[in-house]
Every structure is written in structure tokens, then in C-alpha cells.
Image (spheres, coloured by chain):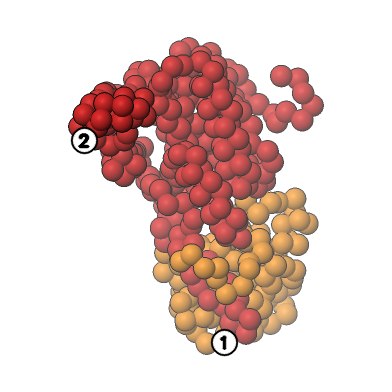
Chain colours: A red, B orange
Amino acid sequence: DTHLSSPPLRDYTESLTLWTTLQTKTQPLSHSLAAHLRLILTPTQATKLSGTFRTGKRLNIKKIIPYIASGYKRDKIWMRRAVPSKRAYQILLCVDDSASMAGALGEIDGETPAHLALESLVMVARALAVLEAGSIGVLGFGSGEPFLAHSLSDPPFTASADAGARVLQKFTFRQEGTDMVRLLRGVVERFREGRLMQSGSSGGEELWQLALVLSDGLVQSREHALLRPLLREALEMRVMVVFIVMDDAGPAKTKRTSVLDLKEARFGPDGVPVIHRYLDSFPFPYYLIVHHLADLPGALAGLLRSWFAEVNA
Amino acid sequence: MDEPMADAPGAQVRVTFTTTEADLELPESKRQLLVPADIRRYGLSRVLNSESMLDTGSIPFDFLVNGSFLRTSLEDYLTANGLSVETNLSLQYVRSLIPPVYEASF
Ligand SMILES: [Mg+2]
């Protein structure tokens, strides 16, 4: 890609080393996540309606006329949930590429949200690849339009170190803003395209779309209100958005306050400052706060489990 | 939680308050704060003095950023120094009643 507006890339050799390091480091957790997800992502409940029964969930329209014609004798006119339908997944991993994710000089050592985000990216992507759960895309976001680091329609980037490194290369954590509104618009748009892509290709599979946002959670509070209608739109499209807050509070030298403790000051009309808890206006209904990578598999699995239980209820 | 808060806020900046004055130290969980980007020395003083922070009433504070006194809004400081709102600004606060000589030594 030689387009003039392309952001600078991380060095390829460095990215290759990073990929290998992260892959080795996250291997056991990736397995554990895959084990959790195997139970959750495979349908256990019958969701498809079929058959002919005396009672059931929905009328089988084709049976109505014979029913009337038979003088209401052929009364097996109902369908029931009988066949577990096969599921197809599209998963977008959305990585916050903004400068707040990195250290003061753009470094992404082990104590930054940026590092935790990349670790999570590798871990989750590899777990999903093992499960052959569906297609996985990577979206980066910051101050401008979100960029596609890996398309849903491309073969998995976890297949080779080269492909993995090329995804990592796109993240330099130098963007001077965190535009979550544009990210959500981008997610909704990609998933609309994804649904069209799917309906063109497959027969009768049930499509599930999931966006995981990997970010330090610092969104300008004025955007919170703008995000709510977009989150509702996603919900109506049956897109699940999970916000995973990379809250690596780090050792003493970083002294990054946990987002759980973070407060914000606002001035009322009388000029008196009022201190609120930042998370009180945080608009994402599904979010996890991850302090250590090891927390993620269990937490993510728990959240997805309850979500599936909710939508299948 | 769903209704908008008192005022529609503008841009915010994350700051970390530090001090060398032992009697005015904030507990660790209160040192980082999101503040309006257009805030100046006076607003920052009011925030620090507020009940949920130091609860000190009305001590006038001065703020040092990278060794110099803050004389503009944080927004203007960031712009003048080529920084963005993604920056975590470290603000060292000192009691404002300091002799000019001391100030000159910075
Ligand atoms: Mg940011």
C-alpha cells in the first residue's frame, strides 16, 4: 500500500519478533480461551423451526389449506424448535491505536495498555482460529477513519508469522485522538457488508457478529452521549459489542491510575467543580476490565456465555 | 446514568497532580483526573481545593508543567508544545504565595 495518506508502519523485522514473542507468551491462555469458547460458540440449543406437530411455536403456512380442506382434521400444522442450526461467526477485533495507549515516548513495553492490547489481539485471534469459529477481521482506530488491518474476507492472519507481523505493523499508537464514534460507525458498516457477503455464500447458517474493542477506555466524555444511539443500532442488527478495557495499572514507575478509580472534574453553571466517576457515564453496556492478560479468557467467556443465554432466552 | 450531566463538556485532558509539599499530598487514587481542556490555573486551583480532592477551601495554587509555570489554558499549552489531548500531563502544584525570586529560579 503506497497511498500517500497511509500511516507509518512499525518496522517489519521488529513486528515479526513481536509476533513470535506474543504468540509464545499467550499460547497457554489462548488454549484456555479456546476451551472455554468451544462450549459457548457451538449451538447447544435448537433454534431452527421445523416439522409438523399438533402444538408448537409457529404455524406452518403450507399446512393451513390442507387443514381447512380436511375439515380441520389434518391438524399437525405447527413447527417446533427441532434442529440446532449451524452458526457462522464474524468477529472484528478493534484495536485502539491512539497515543494514550502507549508510554510517553510512544513505547509499548510490558506496562502499557498498548502491549496488553496486542497480547489480547494475538491471544483471542489464535483461540478463534483454532476453533475455526468463522472469519476474523482487525480494525484499528484513533483520530481519523478506522483502518482495516485485516479484512473479514481474507484468510486468517494467524496462519503465518508473516501475516501476523503485517497486522502488528499497522499499530504504532501515535494517533492524536480516540474517535469511538467513528469506530462504531465503521463496525456497523463492516458488519452490514459482512452480512451481505454471508447471505451470498452460505445456505441457512445463522450469522453472529461480534466486535471486541481493545482500548484503554479513555474516550472523551462528550462522545458518550453520541455513542448510545450507535450502540442501540448495533444491538438492533444483532451485533454484539464488547468493550475490553486494557487497564494495566503497571508497576510503581508508570503510576497509571486504574480506570476504575479515574474521576473527572466538570464545572457546573455556578462555576463550582463537581467530581464524577469516569465510568459512570461510560456508554458500553458490555464491558470487561482486564488488569492482567490471564484475566481475559475467563472474563470474556463469562460475558459471552451470559449474552448468548440472554439472546436465546 | 442515562441523562446528560449538568453541562455538555468540551474536550478533556488527563492530568496527574504531583507536589513536593508533604502536607498537601493527594491520596494515590486521586492523583489522576480528567479535566476540561480549557481549564486554567484558577480552575485547577478550585478543583484541587474542592471537597472531593484536598478539601482545603481556597488555597491559591500555581502549577508547573515541565518546569515552567502554567500561564495559559491546558489546551493552549498542548498546542504550543505540539502535544495532543492523548497526552497525560503532569502538573506539579505549589502554594501560590511564593516570592518572585523563587519563581525566577525556575
Ligand atoms: Mg486514547
Q: Are marks 1 and 2 on the same chain?
A: no
Quarter placement of the N terminus of chain A: top right
Q: Tell which of B61 and A87 is nearer to you.
A: A87
Give the amino acid type for the residue marked by disc 1 in the picture. Ser
Q: Is residue A42 visible?
A: no
Q: Quadrant of residue A46?
A: top left
Name the secondary structure under disc 1.
loop
Image coordinates of residue B23 in percent, x first then y, are 45, 78
Residue appearing at x 69%, y 82% in the figure = B99
Q: Tell which of B37 and A109 is nearer to you.
A: B37
Q: Is residue B16 visible?
A: yes
Label 1 – label 2 distance at C-alpha: 75 Å
Q: Tell which of A289 and A307 is nearer to you.
A: A307
Vertically, is A313 above or below B36?
above
Residue appearing at x 24%, y 32% in the figure = A72
Give the amino acid type for the residue marked by disc 2 in the picture. Thr
- Mark 1 or 2, which is nearer the eye? 2
Vertically, is B50 above or below A257?
below
Marks 1/2 in contact by CB < 8 Å: the verdict is no
Pointer 1 chain:
B
Image coordinates of residue B97 in percent, x first then y, are 64, 84
Image coordinates of residue A173 in percent, x first then y, are 60, 38
Residue appearing at x 31%, y 35% in the figure = A58
Q: Badge 2 is on which residue?
A: A55
Disc 1 residue: CB within 8 Å of ligand 1: no
Image coordinates of residue B96 in percent, x first then y, are 64, 81
Position of A121 with respect to B48 (left or right) is left
Q: Badge 1 is on which residue?
A: B58
